[in-house]
Image (tube, rainbow, N blue to C red):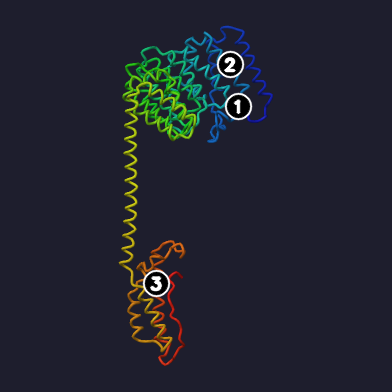
């Protein structure tokens, strides 16, 4: 084995490639090459070259897009291609049916082949698809292990946060396998559908392999139509809610499955299917809404609706009418007009009755909403009244404090401080609590004061008035003597907005 990540030992690499090319030419030109003597070293050579640990490539990056980004090609492909071609020629030859060959192609070898489908190189995956399909067709005892390995790979895709590169190829193999199932289906085949294929709809990378997955599921229902109700139920259960691209894919698959529903199961699936189509038709994403409205171009869907119109008409009348009135996309509106005329043609009397019920329900809903909004307005007003009542009941009379301060200052200006006035002012100041809120000026605008919280502003105002009054009392009693005559000065008023 050579390391192809560097340019060392180029002569040895070229020599090995020439040897492999000579072996391939000999196998192509001669018959009966794979004998009991040559099979063991041949399979050992294949296992050493092919069954290997895959390199960590760009597909492990979360930003990698399998559909748009360029894949990482296998650097050892000049050797691998020759080995794969030798293995393919061995599998399609009659020599692979010998007991020795059967003993060498083991479940472990098959499991390694399935694991290699995660290779980023599409050329390698194409060879693997051909080889695995040939092994499934020629080696009967390995069919169950192959299906089990494929199902295990699907479980990893669903339950592990890993990106797998070969799900599309595995589903293509499985589609041809399902096509060859005998009728009635065995329970193990139905188990494969329930536990491996249907959960794949929840995989984050589902859009990359949805066409192959839809084909496999449709083939199962085509083989046994009694599975249609179960499959439709699971499909609706896994319906995407926020991924519009996946929702369009689900709508395509749902329509294909509805075409396969038998008449005896039509009533069982009609209501859940049309409810889901109605929810998609109501979508604001125009592609989802259009795809839901295009269902009415399918004659099988129209026939299914007509057979159960008493049950389904109320579901669609409301959706179509709201699309016509409120949807932003003109194409959706035009398709909704078409569906509306189709519903009227199917049963005009029932349509009118459904419209009447819809208008009554709409009117009732509007009245309930109006009553709810009115109740909220009343609750807001009641809460505001209670807040003001609590504030006014706990506030001191700041206006009295301000008036007493003016009296004291006027008396001081004329004849010095008055003990009686100061005693009155002290009594009023002692009743002022800084922690209490105040509503002394209801006309004061909070936006003009710059204070965001009215209660905080009023508390600050009460505290400021109280402190100023106390300062007036102490200064007047301790500093100013009685015999000092001051000049007359105007009364000082308190500006509460400062």
**Which quadrant of the figure contains the N terminus?**
top right
**Which residue is depicted at the point 63% across and 28% down?**
4
Depth order, front residue of 424/18: 424
Q: Is residue 351 above or below residue 37?
A: below
Residue under label 1, please give it: 73
Mark 3 vs mark 1, CA separation in Å? 80 Å
Visible residue check, residue 220: no
**Residue 251 on image: x %, y %:** 44, 26
Disc 2 on helix, strand or loop?
Answer: helix
* Mark 1 residue crowding within 10 angstroms, few (<14) / some (14–19) / many (20+): some
Visible residue check, residue 419: yes
| Disc 2 versus disc 3: nearer the observer | 3
**Quick one: which residue is furthest to the top in this view?**
31
Mark 1 vs mark 2, CA separation in Å? 18 Å
* Mark 3 residue crowding within 10 angstroms, few (<14) / some (14–19) / many (20+): some
Q: Is residue 81 above or below residue 468?
A: above
| Disc 3 versus disc 1: nearer the observer | 3
Residue under label 2, please give it: 85
Dots 1 and 2: beta carbons under 8 Å?
Answer: no
Q: In which quarter of the image is residue 421?
A: bottom left
Q: Quick check: 466 left or right of 26?
A: left
What mark, if any, has residue 463 been given in the picture?
3
Depth order, front residue of 463/324: 324
Q: In this view, does 431 lie above or below 83?
A: below
First in sequence, mark 3 or 1: give its number: 1
């Amino acid at each position: 084995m050579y390391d192809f990540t560097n340019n060392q030992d180029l002569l040895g690499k070229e020599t090995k490639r020439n040897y492999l090319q000579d072996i391939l030419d000999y196998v192509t030109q001669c018959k009966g090459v794979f004998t009991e003597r040559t099979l063991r070293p041949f399979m050992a050579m294949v296992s050493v070259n092919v069954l290997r640990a895959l390199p960590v490539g760009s597909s492990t990056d979360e930003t990698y897009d399998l559909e748009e980004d360029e894949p990482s090609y296998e650097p050892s492909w000049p050797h691998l291609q020759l080995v794969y071609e030798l293995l393919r020629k061995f599998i399609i030859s009659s020599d692979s049916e010998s007991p020795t060959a059967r003993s060498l192609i083991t479940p472990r070898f098959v499991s390694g082949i399935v694991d290699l489908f995660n290779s980023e190189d599409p050329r390698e995956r194409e060879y693997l698809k051909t080889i695995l399909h040939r092994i499934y067709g020629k080696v009967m005892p390995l069919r169950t292990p192959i299906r089990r390995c494929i199902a295990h790979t699907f479980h990893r895709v669903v339950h592990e946060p890993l990106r797998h590169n070969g799900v599309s190829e595995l589903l293509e193999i499985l589609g041809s396998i399902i096509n060859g199932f005998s009728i009635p289906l065995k329970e193990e085949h139905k188990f494969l559908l329930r536990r491996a294929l249907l959960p794949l709809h929840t995989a984050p990378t589902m859009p990359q392999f949805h066409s192959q997955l839809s084909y496999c599921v449709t083939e199962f229902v085509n083989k046994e139509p009694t599975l249609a109700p179960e499959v439709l139920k699971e499909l609706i259960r896994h319906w995407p809610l926020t991924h519009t691209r996946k929702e369009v894919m689900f709508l395509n698959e749902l329509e294909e499955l509805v075409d396969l529903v038998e008449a005896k199961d039509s009533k069982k699936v009609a209501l859940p299917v049309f409810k889901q189509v109605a929810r998609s038709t109501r979508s604001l994403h125009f592609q989802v809404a259009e795809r839901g409205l295009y269902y009415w171009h399918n004659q099988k869907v129209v026939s299914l609706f007509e057979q159960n119109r008493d049950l389904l008409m109320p579901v669609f009348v409301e959706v179509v009418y709201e699309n016509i009135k409120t949807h932003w996309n003109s194409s959706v509106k035009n398709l909704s007009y078409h569906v509306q005329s189709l519903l009227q043609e199917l049963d005009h009397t029932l349509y009118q009755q459904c419209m009447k019920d819809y208008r009554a329900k709409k009117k009732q809903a509007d009245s309930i909403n109006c009553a709810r909004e009115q109740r909220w307005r009343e609750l807001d007003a009641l809460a505001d009244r209670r807040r003001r009542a609590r504030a006014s009941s706990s506030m001191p009379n700041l206006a009295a404090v301000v008036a007493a301060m003016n009296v004291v200052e006027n008396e001081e200006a004329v004849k010095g401080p008055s003990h009686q006035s100061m005693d009155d002012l002290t009594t009023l100041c002692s009743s002022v609590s800084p922690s209490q809120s105040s509503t002394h000026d209801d006309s004061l605008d909070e936006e003009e004061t710059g204070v965001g919280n009215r209660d905080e502003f009023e508390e600050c105002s009460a505290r400021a008035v109280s402190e100023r009054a106390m300062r007036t009392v102490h200064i007047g009693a301790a500093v100013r003597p009685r015999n000092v005559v001051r000049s007359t000065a105007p009364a000082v008023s308190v500006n509460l907005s400062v």
